[in-house]
């Protein structure tokens, strides 16, 4: 793969050129720019490397960059695509970072996260209703969601013709492109940006069913009338008998922005997470952008049972979710390095799966969509009452209504406690009167 360098210039140093975003440039090289800024250009001349300059993001609207996009640095973040497979000096990134006009620079990173093993099944356990743990029946007696409320699932994709999701997917995109990498360990589609985010491994389909399953051969999802925006950001890699969601971390960033700008998401669920290994925090700028547009971002806290921080869950403003078992106890695998907001069911969850099948799976990946779906219901109710909810209001509702797991206001393993949608709706109804 040709080397890609992500470059963020300091404020006030945006290039004025009509620069294509890198996703568009891959398919259309009619506009070619080979310089960016004198200091960086000098470094490239020193090492004998030529590059194409592209933008990391595209503006939300045809009029150009908005004030939020400029303030958060999206308009001054670039991707340098090297024109050949050069042998580059090991200190290239540090040399670029030393340029006075450069705020940050890093090379592309491959992020990997183990996918919880799923047990494919044709029958759900009788009488077991995990939704009771979060008082879901009360909430669904108030509303089953509003189709105008869109919940984006950024994951391994979605089984597009699954009967549980039929009619619920209103927008879709596939941001996985690993062309040029060694993909022999990967399963399924690994090339080309398109609008076919088909899920070969089932993780994203399982998450989507928890949110909006129609109750064909499973319990209804949390918010069965809300809409799904399906965004594939992870390919599937096999290592022995284990499967991993894997993708280029920086390729997820424009997918988040696409979900906000094009998918018009009200909620984003990211049942994924990566550790910070240097440079700026993963996804930080674009998550701030989503939050500035009043998009609630919900993420899994991680599954190693340690005080590790996984991103985006560990970013400020993100609702990080841990898991509980069917007895309401915090699952031992819940990572707690992030500031967990609340916990939700995450063990032995039955939901839709790849190839029109169903499966049981466990993990904070399964807990996160219970919370994302619950927020979708709250936003639906507010909309039905002629109002709306800010991210701050949503966090406040969860903080004040979750069931504490001990005498403390906040527990590092469980946040403010187990999501309680009955109390959340009572709190919301009272605050709107």
Image (cartoon, helix red, strand yellow):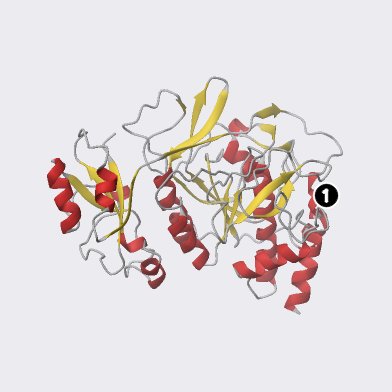
Quadrant assignment for the C terminus: bottom right
Quadrant position of residue 207: top right
Q: Residue furthest bottom?
A: 433
Q: Is residue 332 left or right of residue 248?
A: right
For the question of whether residue 26 can be seen, the reply is no
Q: Residues within 10 Å of mark 1 (few under 14, many from 20)?
A: some
Residue drawn at point x = 36 percent, y = 42 percent: 108
Where does label 1 land, which residue?
132
Which one is in front, 42 or 289? 42
Using the image, determine if residue 94 lies above or below residue 182.
Answer: below
Q: Is residue 310 above or below residue 425?
A: above
Task: Name the element at disc 1.
Answer: helix
Q: What residue appears at the point 23 percent right and 56 percent down from the top-left corner?
A: 99
Q: Quadrant of residue 120?
A: top right
In the rendered image, residue 291, in percent from the top left (x then y), is placed at: 52, 64
Could you tell me which residue is drawn at 73 percent across and 77 percent down? 432
User: Residue 184's x, y, as percent?
Assistant: 41, 23
Q: Is residue 55 left or right of residue 250?
A: left
Q: Is residue 47 left or right of residue 360?
A: left
Q: On the picture, is 137 further left or further right than 16? A: right
In percent of width and height, residue 321 lies at 66, 50
Query: What is the total number of numbered labels drawn onto the structure image?
Result: 1
In the displayed structure, 238 sits above or below 104; it is above
Q: Quarter-wise, where is residue 355 in the image?
A: top right
Image vertical order of residue 59 relative to residue 30, above or below: below
* Residue 283 can be seen in this image: yes
Q: Residue furthest right?
A: 127
Residue drawn at (62%, 47%) of the image: 301
Q: Who is closer to the viewer here, 25 or 301?
A: 301
Q: Position of residue 324 (x, y in %)?
A: 75, 44
In the picture, which quadrant includes the N terminus?
Answer: top left
């Amino acid at each position: 793969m040709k080397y890609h360098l992500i470059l963020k210039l300091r404020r006030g140093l945006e290039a004025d050129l009509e620069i294509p975003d890198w996703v568009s440039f891959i398919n259309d090289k009619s506009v070619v720019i080979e310089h960016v800024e004198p200091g960086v250009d000098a470094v490239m001349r020193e090492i004998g490397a030529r590059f194409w300059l592209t933008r990391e993001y595209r503006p939300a609207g045809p009029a150009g960059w908005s004030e939020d996009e400029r303030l958060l640095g999206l308009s001054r973040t670039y991707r340098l695509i090297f024109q050949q497979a050069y042998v580059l000096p090991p200190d290239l990134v540090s040399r670029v970072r030393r340029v006075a006009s450069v705020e940050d620079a890093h090379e592309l990173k491959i992020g990997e996260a183990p996918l919880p093993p799923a047990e494919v099944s044709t029958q759900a356990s009788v009488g077991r209703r995990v939704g009771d743990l979060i008082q879901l029946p009360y909430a669904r007696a108030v509303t089953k969601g509003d189709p105008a409320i869109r919940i984006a699932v950024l994951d391994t994709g979605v089984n597009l013709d699954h009967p549980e999701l039929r009619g619920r997917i209103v927008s879709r995109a596939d941001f996985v492109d690993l062309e040029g990498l060694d993909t022999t360990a990967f399963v399924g589609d690994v090339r080309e940006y398109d609008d076919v985010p088909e899920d070969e491994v089932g993780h994203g389909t399982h998450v989507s069913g928890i949110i909006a399953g129609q109750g064909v051969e499973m319990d209804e999802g949390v918010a069965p009338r809300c809409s799904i925006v399906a965004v594939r950001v992870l390919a599937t890699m096999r290592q022995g008998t284990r499967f991993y969601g894997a993708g280029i971390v920086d390729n997820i960033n424009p997918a988040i922005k696409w979900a906000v700008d094009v998918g018009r998401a009200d909620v984003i669920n990211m049942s994924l997470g990566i550790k910070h290994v240097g440079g700026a925090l993963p996804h930080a700028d674009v998550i701030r952008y989503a939050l500035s547009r009043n998009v609630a971002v919900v993420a899994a806290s991680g599954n190693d049972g340690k005080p590790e921080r996984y991103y985006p869950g560990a970013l400020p403003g993100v609702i990080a979710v841990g898991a509980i078992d069917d007895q309401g106890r915090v699952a031992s695998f819940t990572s707690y390095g992030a500031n967990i907001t609340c916990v939700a069911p995450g063990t032995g969850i039955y939901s839709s799966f790849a190839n029109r099948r169903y499966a049981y799976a466990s993990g904070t990946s399964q807990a996160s969509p219970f919370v994302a779906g619950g927020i979708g219901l709250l936003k639906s109710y507010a909309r039905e009452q002629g109002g709306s909810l800010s991210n701050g209001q949503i966090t406040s509702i969860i903080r004040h209504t979750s069931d504490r797991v001990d005498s403390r206001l906040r527990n590092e393993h469980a946040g403010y406690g187990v999501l309680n949608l009955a109390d959340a709706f009572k709190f919301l109804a009272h605050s709107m009167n």
